[in-house]
Every structure is written in structure tokens, then in C-alpha cells.
């Protein structure tokens, strides 16, 4: 497993991270608990050290699942990246974001307990709270860093201005944000700002929630609770257009002797040594397909061919429904 460092102050991690949300949240349909735990074990055995979760994924269930999967492992052999602040109701509905300093301490206490650990490697607000200045939120996490409960501070889905304000309070290790061949808004202002300040990037959604996996079909129906049933990019009309992009990408992948998914992951990894793609594999089979992506070497001709197949801005439909798009610091 290759390794990368998240920014100038962040942790040294595997070059590919594991996103755990789909293992228990139901966002992509029902998950199998035993298979999820086996997938975490397989990832660790393959050298994956960075594991990403959120305290609101299935209202804490995801953290409890990871605690079970990680039990008995050397705590220094992996890094836990945790998002906090998203409020949810008993019907699993989202109810905004709470980034007040007192909420930071409260959320952290629950996460430490559920995960069965005395510290988190990266702690970050899931979204910006418009009612709380980012300086107050980062200042509260800084207190937790000083107390030894948090090793590094991260951000998620915020714009360049917010990154600068947060970094002025305490060094930011990384920004977690959606980045893929279908979502490239980060390239305009955010990525240059990160590099100027020495901040890493952990990219989620590298397979476009399955669109770039090479396995999605136009006649496939999202199952109960699957968020893709409400995704504009999977809506009729948009989906057919987006799958045509995937087929163009598949032709490039065939020339490289890899799968569409591997090529999509390799493209993100090739955008810089300061970027760590997160793969939301829920099964050992999908993990096994993703891992070889790090061996796919892309030269200038390959990158040009990929750009022709999936030009920037080519995807149709927003990456989230309108209410969720309003919470993002950058768009598509």
C-alpha cells in the first residue's frame, strides 16, 4: 500500500481511504453487518489505514460497527476521521447543523465512547453552520487537540474563504469534499487554496455514488432508502446522459487493462500527492476491485483521453437535491 501525507501538518495515511457510511446508514440500500466488518478487516490487512465515518451515520450505528471491527487492533495502526454536527430526527430526517463550541465537546464525547477510543485522528464539522462563525468551531476543536482528544482538525464541504479563516485559528490537516470526474468544482478556487496553505484533500464520491463504478444500468431501480432514488444525477434523462459518459470512459479503461471504477479512482489519485481518495466499499468484492486502482499509472496521453471522455462539467443534474445543495460551500 502506498502512503501519502495529508497536508504539511496532517497524518501519514494510506494512499486510499475507506469510507464507512454505506456499511450501516442504508444510504445505498441495506448492508450486511458481517460483510461490512469483514470488509474493514480486509481493508486493514491490505494496508488501508484511513477510515472515515460520521457520528450521524445511522445515528451512531456506524461508529459502533467500526468499534466492533477495530476491536483488538493496535490503535496506532489506523486513523479515524470523524465528521460531526449534523442533526437528525427519529425518522432519520436531517435537521440542520450544530457547530457551537458546547456541541463540539458533546459530540466528541459520544464519538469517543461509541468508537471505544481515547482520541480521534481527524475531527471535522460535516457542514458549515451558518449561525456559528467557523473560528468558534475550530477554536473549540483546538481545545480538544490541546487536551489530547483530537490529533488533527479537518473541514468538510466549505469554500476557500472559510478554509482561510479556519486555518488562521489552527492548522487544518485536510478538507473532505466530493471530487471525481463528475464533480470538479473544487479545481477552481478550493484546490489552489489548499495547496497554498499546505492542506490535504480527502476526496469522497470518487465513483459518483455508483455512476462511475461501471456496474450501474439505466434500468436499475434504487432500493428502499437508497439516496440515489432522490439524486438528480440518477433521474430519468440525466441518468442516460451520465451513463453515456461512463461508456466513453469504459473504452479508455479497456485500453489501460483496468475497470471503469479503477480508472475513475486512479484519475482522482493522479490529481496530486496531497489527495487521498475515499472508497465507500461495502463488500470485500468491491474493495478488491478498488485497491488495484493505485497501480494504474496515467500519463499525459491517458489523462487527455479521460478528459475527452468525461470533460469537466459534462455530468447532468446536481450532485444533491436542492435542499442539500444549499448547505455546500462549492457546487458541482
Image: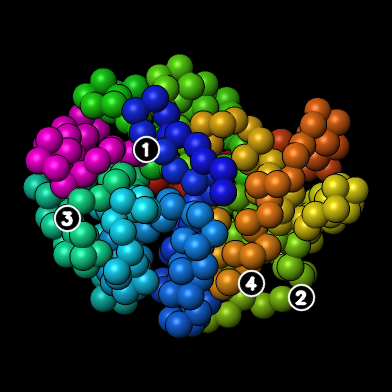
Q: In this view, does 301 lie to the left or right of 62?
A: right
Q: How many marks?
A: 4
Instruction: Give the class, few, some or many, for how many residues have Cα within 10 Å of label 4's Cα (few <14, many ≥20).
Output: few
Quarter of the figure with residue 161: top left
Circle 1 sits on which residue?
A: 11
**Residues at circles 3 and 2 in contact by the CB criterion of under 8 Å:** no
Q: Nearer the viewer, mark 3 or mark 2?
A: 3
Look at the numbered disc 3 and give the secondary structure of its residue: loop
Instruction: Give the class, few, some or many, for how many residues have Cα within 10 Å of label 3's Cα (few <14, many ≥20).
Output: few
Residue stretch in magenta:
134-155
Circle 4 sits on which residue?
A: 285
For marks 4 and 1 on the same chain, the one whose residue lies earlier in the sequence: 1
Q: Closest to the observer: 39 or 183?
A: 39
Q: Which residue is drawn at 56% across and 73% down?
A: 283
Q: How far apart are marks 4 and 2 (CA)?
A: 23 Å
Q: Distance between the residues labelled 1 and 2?
A: 42 Å
Q: Which residue is drawn at 25% across and 64% down?
A: 115
* Disc number placed over residue 118 in the picture, else none: 3
Amino acid at each position: 500500500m502506498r502512503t501519502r501525507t495529508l497536508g504539511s501538518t496532517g497524518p501519514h495515511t494510506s494512499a486510499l481511504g475507506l469510507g464507512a457510511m454505506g456499511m450501516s446508514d442504508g444510504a445505498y440500500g441495506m448492508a450486511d453487518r458481517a460483510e461490512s466488518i469483514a470488509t474493514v478487516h480486509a481493508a486493514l490487512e491490505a494496508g488501508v489505514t484511513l477510515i472515515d465515518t460520521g457520528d450521524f451515520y445511522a445515528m451512531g450505528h456506524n461508529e459502533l460497527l467500526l468499534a466492533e471491527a477495530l476491536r483488538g487492533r493496535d490503535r496506532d495502526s489506523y486513523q479515524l476521521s470523524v465528521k460531526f454536527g449534523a442533526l437528525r430526527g427519529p425518522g432519520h430526517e436531517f435537521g440542520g447543523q450544530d457547530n457551537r463550541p458546547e456541541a463540539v465537546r458533546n459530540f466528541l464525547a459520544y464519538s469517543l465512547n461509541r468508537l471505544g477510543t481515547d482520541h480521534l485522528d481527524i475531527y471535522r464539522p460535516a457542514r458549515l453552520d451558518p449561525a456559528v462563525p467557523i473560528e468558534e468551531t475550530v477554536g473549540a476543536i483546538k481545545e480538544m487537540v490541546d487536551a489530547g482528544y483530537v490529533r488533527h482538525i479537518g473541514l468538510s464541504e466549505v469554500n476557500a474563504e472559510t478554509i482561510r479563516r479556519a486555518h488562521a485559528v489552527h492548522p487544518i490537516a485536510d478538507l473532505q469534499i466530493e471530487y471525481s470526474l463528475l464533480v470538479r468544482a473544487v479545481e477552481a478556487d478550493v484546490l489552489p487554496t489548499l495547496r497554498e496553505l499546505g492542506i490535504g484533500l480527502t476526496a469522497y464520491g470518487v465513483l459518483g455514488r455508483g455512476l462511475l463504478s461501471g456496474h450501474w444500468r439505466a434500468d436499475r431501480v434504487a432500493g428502499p432508502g437508497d439516496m440515489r432514488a432522490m439524486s438528480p444525477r440518477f433521474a430519468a434523462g440525466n441518468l442516460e446522459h451520465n451513463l453515456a459518459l461512463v461508456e466513453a470512459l469504459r473504452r479508455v479503461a479497456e485500453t489501460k487493462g483496468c475497470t471503469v471504477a479503477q480508472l475513475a479512482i486512479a484519475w482522482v489519485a493522479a490529481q496530486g500527492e496531497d489527495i487521498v481518495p475515499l472508497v465507500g466499499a461495502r463488500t470485500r468484492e468491491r474493495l478488491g476491485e478498488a485497491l488495484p486502482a493505485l497501480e494504474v499509472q496515467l500519463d499525459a496521453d491517458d489523462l487527455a483521453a479521460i478528459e475527452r471522455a468525461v470533460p469537466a462539467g459534462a455530468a447532468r443534474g446536481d450532485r444533491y437535491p436542492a435542499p442539500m445543495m444549499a448547505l455546500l460551500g462549492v457546487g458541482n
